[in-house]
Amino acid sequence: MRIAVLKETASGETRVAASPETVKKFIALGASVAVEPGAGETSSISDADYAAAGAEVAKDAVKGADIVLGVQGPDPKKLKGANAGAWIVAGLDPFGQRARVDEYAKAGFEALAMEFMPRITRAQSMDILSSQSNLSGYKAVIEAANAYGRAFPMMMTAAGTVAAAKCFVMGVGVAGLQAIATARRLGAQVSATDVRSATKEQILSLGAKPIFVESVAGIEGEGAGGYATEMSEEYQKAQAELVSAHIAKQDIVITTALIPGRAAPRLISDAQIKTMKPGSVIFDLAVAQGGNVEGSKADEVVVKHGVKIIGWSNTPSHLAADASALFARNLYNFLSAFWDKEAGKPVLDEEIGNAVRLTQGGKVVNERLLGV
């Protein structure tokens, strides 16, 4: 069983899909690991580090590979030489890169999309969305604090008192919870909102103030697998009114709302931005999927009405070393959980296998993609 680790080629991608730690673990399972030269360079991992862990560092790493690991889906052209039926295990962006998925199928590869991992207890350690979102939530607050130009905590000095910054987190998933915790640690007054009523207790547990629509009953906002769903027009209107009143008082706003396979919901309009104080900062974590904030642009700092709007297309890559380490463990946890010692390879079960498998036998087989 040969596992190949390729150097990422997507613009702005600094992560790598394997670490020296996971290389050692794969070898302990009985696999051989080949790493493309320079694959870990932008994640502070040298070729020598991989070699010391037991990997072969080779330009033709993909040749004879049974499994190819990636952070983002590799260009099908880079897979020439991989064995027939080889597994492509990565974040494949199945909806945004459907044409590439079709190419994997045509080439006879079995593409496994790690972002389709079901949110069940036994798969938590395999969930790349959670591990990467956790870092994104942290980084969003740090960058917002840097751009803010004022102190986050309240400071009482001989020259006077500096008021604590007010930080509002919109969307309380993994990224949102980490954003709340980070802003609290920096000393801000933190509030948060979400369409899922169940998150209210989580917000309170982190010492933040929940901001919820109370006048519209019977809307939980909880979709399959714990993801948020789109809300009714009635709820969206009520939420907009609540947010408009609250956002005008905020110094920092972090937006994190995403719906799998769909454009990011619009949470903040230009009119709402106009009510904010000059010098305020908004970090839009959903900018790569269309953005939660009107006027936000990926990898640009946009200034509107005196408010700085920041959004990166790949936030985890700004923490490449830690993001790579966690991503690599996700992939190892996934493959090792299904490793069959007698077969010398992983054998997937139906529950997780059917969830993540996009292509097999030359066809697209995932139900979420069929008909799309």
Image: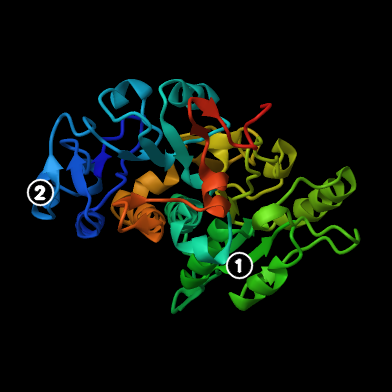
Type of the residue with mark 1: Val
Say which of marks 1 and 2 sits in front.
2
Using the rendered image of the protein, determine whether residue 219 is visible from the camera's viewpoint.
Answer: yes
First of labels 1, 2 by sequence position: 2
Residue at left 77%, top 55%? Answer: 221
Q: Is residue 100 above or below residue 330?
A: above
The image shows residue 196 at horizontal and vertical percentages of: 74, 60
Please tell me which residue lies in front, 208 or 344. Answer: 344
Q: Name the residue tied to disc 1.
A: 190
Q: Quadrant of the N terminus?
A: top left
The image shows residue 89 at horizontal and vertical percentages of: 40, 41
Q: Residues within 10 Å of mark 1 (few under 14, many from 20)?
A: many
Instruction: Measure how far apart labels 1 and 2 are at the Cα level.
Output: 46 Å
Type of the residue with mark 2: Ala
Q: Is residue 260 above or below residue 187?
A: above
Residue at left 42%, top 53%? Answer: 146
Horizontal side of residue 45 vs 93, given as left or right: left
Please tell me which residue lies in front, 194 or 222. Answer: 222
Q: Residues within 10 Å of mark 2 (few under 14, many from 20)?
A: some
The image shows residue 13 at horizontal and vertical percentages of: 35, 37
Secondary structure, mark 2, is helix
Q: Is residue 211 above or below residue 369?
A: below
Q: Name the residue tied to disc 2.
A: 51
Using the rendered image of the protein, determine whether residue 97 is visible from the camera's viewpoint.
Answer: no
Horizontal side of residue 131 vs 1, given as left or right: right
The image shows residue 40 at horizontal and vertical percentages of: 22, 44
Q: How many marks?
A: 2
Residue at left 66%, top 63%? Answer: 192
Secondary structure, mark 1, is strand
Horizontal side of residue 213 vs 251, given as left or right: right
